[in-house]
Amino acid sequence: MAATDHSQLIKQDSKDYLTTALLQLLEKNSYQSINISQVVRRAGVSRMAFYRNFNSLDDVLIAYFSPIISERFSEIIQQVSPDAKINSLENYFQEFSETLKRSVSQGYEPIIRQVFNANMELFYNSFPLFAEIKNPERKYYIKFMSDGVYSIWREWLITDQKEPLETIHRLLSTLQHSTLTALKKQ
């Protein structure tokens, strides 16, 4: 049992070293210019240690960002009222703005978007009114709205938040309401 615990600690240490190394490399390099050899060299672990923990550099970033984003979305989803959920989501957008900007400038934004969209699906499914929509419409509505919310949020952040967040909130609310109303009329 002790050997198993010890090997799990070593494996976790390797994951942590590899993640830290990749994040450090991303401070000065674009994601596309970084390779596994650079990461393992910086982490001080073997290439085999990398492949025991991850299949790709994408997996490293997904493993790092998934719990961070998921934890925040879990807090948002636990809000009872729809308005509280939306307000919590707005706070999240502001808190996460620097991470998104960095992901855009360093070239790993698709990973952030992937994790974000997976959590937006949970977010939309937490609203009882979406239960009224049956598949496949529900699935596509959630995909459409998740991508739309992300794109609007991204544009707002990248253009230095020129509009008040309340304006963005009203726009998203209007888009969600009108598309949901249209789906219900079908």
Image (cartoon, grey):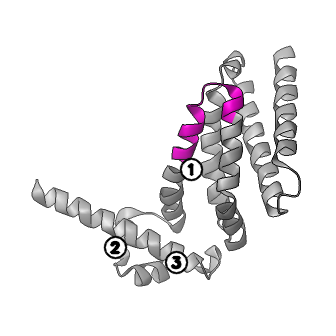
Choose mark 3 or mark 2, whichever is in front.
Answer: 3
Choose mark 1 or mark 2, whichever is in front.
Answer: 1
Is residue 186 at least partly visible in the picture? no
Against 114, residue 22 (above or below) is below
Instruction: Measuring from the top left, give residue 103's x and y in whole percent.
Output: 66, 66
At 41% from the left and 84% from the top, the residue drawn is: 41
Is residue 141 at least partly visible in the picture? yes
SS at badge 3: helix
How many other residues sit within 10 Å of disc 2, few (<14), some (14-19) or many (≥20)? few
Q: Tell me whether circle 3 and circle 1 mark residues in contact (CB < 8 Å).
A: no
Instruction: Measuring from the top left, give residue 158's x and y in whole percent.
Output: 80, 63
Label 1 is placed on what type of residue?
Ile
At 39% from the left and 67% from the top, the residue drawn is: 16
Residue 134: image tag:
none
Q: Mark 2 points at which residue?
A: 48
Residue 24: image tag:
3
Q: Mark 1 points at which residue?
A: 69
- Specify which label sits upstream in the sequence, 3 or 1: 3
Against 15, residue 42 (above or below) is below
Label 3 is placed on what type of residue?
Gln
